Image (cartoon, rainbow, N blue to C red):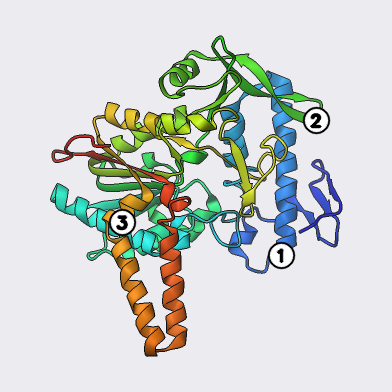
């Protein structure tokens, strides 16, 4: 949609958007109206996003003026999770067709149904009933399809930072089982913790190879414009880069994923037996080396790559490729036995490729003499499920399985 004119007043809360769009007082519109009120217009949602981003940018500049430049991870955390302006915390539900991105469970319900077989196998392995915990549960599409495929249906919790998503998840597992953090679980559980496309959104530091060592990039301000400024690298950043950065050319960028590695330890401490399953785009440190010239930091909005992350803080998703070498090390340090797979191989081993062959055979049978509407439905289902295995798309995601408990075995990767 082309917008001819945008005028934002962050003092009075008024947002004027040209090209025939509405005038919206963002202070008067509930933050999550788009998620809870179908009558809320697309025009209002766009205006709200512009308004909240402008107000967050103003607050960030004030913070920088008072205390100096911000470590990039603090800036990224505010952009994504600030309660009054963060992309996830203050906006509508993002992981839907009308939102900003789709993940595997929104693409095909067979993603969750296939993971259900993994959960059933873990139940057999540890020899007791299991629970399921979905962290970064989003729209609830993964939990819904996974739980529907399990009999008996296990107890489940959803962990989610977005209020809009929490409202949707209450319809899947009940409001009492929708949590704000893993720390709210009722003690360590036996079961499976799943994090699908979560860790790519955890805040990162930025480090550049100067040719003589590592130098960080923090966020400063030049008048009304946010900018990256050089700062000496902190010890934890230097150590992480040396351990997991790989071969980085002079001037190359590394996203330092300290929060993600800490999260792995926290998640495993919430399991007394079972498995942590992390699914995300990225690769090993070695696989990420060709991307180090410019780094992998980027933004998304409305299913497309977005602008520079400094331009519209709070109005876009900010994401990076996940460094699975660092995650594996963190899991093994926590005592887990670790496996690392491609998503296509992982799902195929759980039977998805065989299901695709069955769907193809059914489609052909219907083509020879059956209901044409049903044939189109089966074809669509097969196409969606096949997307999960596409070798240059979702199939190229990585899956880390970290098992704990007496029968966890040894790491294999």
- Disc 1 marks which residue? 41
Q: Is residue 129 something one can see in this rendering?
A: no
Marks 2 and 3 in Cβ contact (< 8 Å):
no
Q: Nearer the viewer, residue 40 or 241?
A: 241
Q: Is residue 279 something one can see in this rendering?
A: yes
The image shows residue 54 at horizontal and vertical percentages of 75, 41
Residue shown at the point (71%, 45%) measured from the top left: 52
Q: Is residue 111 above or below residue 402?
A: below
Q: Which mark is residue 229?
A: none
The residue mark sitting in front, 3 or 1, is 3
The image shows residue 37 at horizontal and vertical percentages of 62, 65
The image shows residue 6 at horizontal and vertical percentages of 84, 49
What kind of element bears circle 1?
A: loop
Q: Nearer the viewer, residue 394 or 6?
A: 394
Q: Nearer the viewer, residue 99 or 87?
A: 99
Separation (CA) of disc 2 from disc 3: 51 Å
- Disc 2 marks which residue? 224
Q: Is residue 175 left or right of residue 304?
A: left
First in sequence, mark 3 or 1: give its number.
1
Marks 1 and 2 in Cβ contact (< 8 Å):
no
What kind of element bears circle 2?
A: loop
Q: Is residue 298 above or below residue 171?
A: above
Q: Is residue 14 above or below residue 64?
A: below
Q: Is residue 315 left or right of residue 16?
A: left
- Disc 3 marks which residue? 348
Task: Quarter of the image for the N terminus: give it.
Answer: bottom right
First in sequence, mark 1 or 2: give its number.
1
Residue shown at the point (50%, 58%) measured from the top left: 167
What kind of element bears circle 3?
A: helix
First in sequence, mark 2 or 3: give its number.
2
């Amino acid at each position: 949609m082309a917008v001819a004119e945008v005028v934002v007043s962050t003092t009075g809360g008024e947002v004027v958007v040209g090209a025939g769009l509405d005038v919206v007082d963002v202070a008067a519109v509930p933050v999550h109206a788009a998620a809870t009120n179908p009558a809320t217009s697309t025009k209002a949602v766009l205006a709200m996003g512009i308004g909240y981003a402008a107000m967050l940018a103003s607050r960030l500049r004030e913070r920088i003026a008072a205390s100096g430049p911000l470590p990039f991870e603090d800036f990224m955390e505010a952009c994504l999770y600030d309660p009054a302006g963060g992309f996830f915390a203050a906006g509508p539900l993002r992981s839907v067709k009308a939102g900003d991105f789709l993940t595997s469970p929104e693409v095909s319900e067979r993603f969750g149904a296939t993971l259900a077989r993994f959960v059933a196998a873990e139940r057999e392995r540890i020899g007791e009933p299991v629970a399921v915990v979905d962290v970064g549960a989003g729209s609830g599409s993964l939990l819904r399809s996974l739980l529907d495929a399990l009999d008996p249906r296990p107890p489940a919790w959803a962990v989610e930072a977005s209020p809009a998503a929490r409202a949707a998840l209450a319809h899947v597992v009940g409001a009492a089982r929708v949590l704000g953090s893993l720390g709210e679980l009722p003690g360590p559980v036996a079961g499976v913790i799943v994090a699908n496309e979560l860790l790519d959104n955890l805040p990162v530091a930025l480090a550049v190879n100067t040719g003589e060592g590592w130098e960080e990039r923090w966020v400063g301000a030049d008048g009304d414009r946010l900018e990256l400024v050089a700062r000496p690298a902190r010890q934890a950043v230097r150590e992480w880069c040396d351990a997991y950065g790989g071969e980085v050319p002079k001037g190359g960028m590394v996203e330092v994923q300290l929060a993600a590695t800490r999260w792995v330890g926290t998640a495993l401490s919430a399991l007394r037996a079972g498995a942590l399953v992390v699914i995300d785009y990225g690769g090993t440190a070695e696989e990420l080396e060709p991307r180090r010239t410019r780094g992998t930091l980027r933004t998304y909005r409305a299913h497309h790559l977005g602008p520079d992350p400094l331009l519209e803080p709070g109005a876009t998703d900010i994401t990076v490729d996940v460094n699975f070498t660092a995650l594996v090390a963190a899991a093994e340090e926590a005592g887990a036995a670790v496996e690392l797979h491609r998503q296509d191989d992982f799902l195929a081993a759980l039977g998805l490729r065989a299901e695709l062959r069955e769907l193809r055979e059914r489609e052909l049978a219907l083509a020879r003499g059956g209901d044409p509407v049903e044939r189109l439905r089966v074809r669509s289902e097969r196409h969606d499920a096949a997307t999960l295995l596409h070798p240059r798309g979702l199939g190229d995601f990585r899956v880390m399985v970290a098992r704990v408990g007496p029968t966890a075995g040894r790491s294999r990767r």
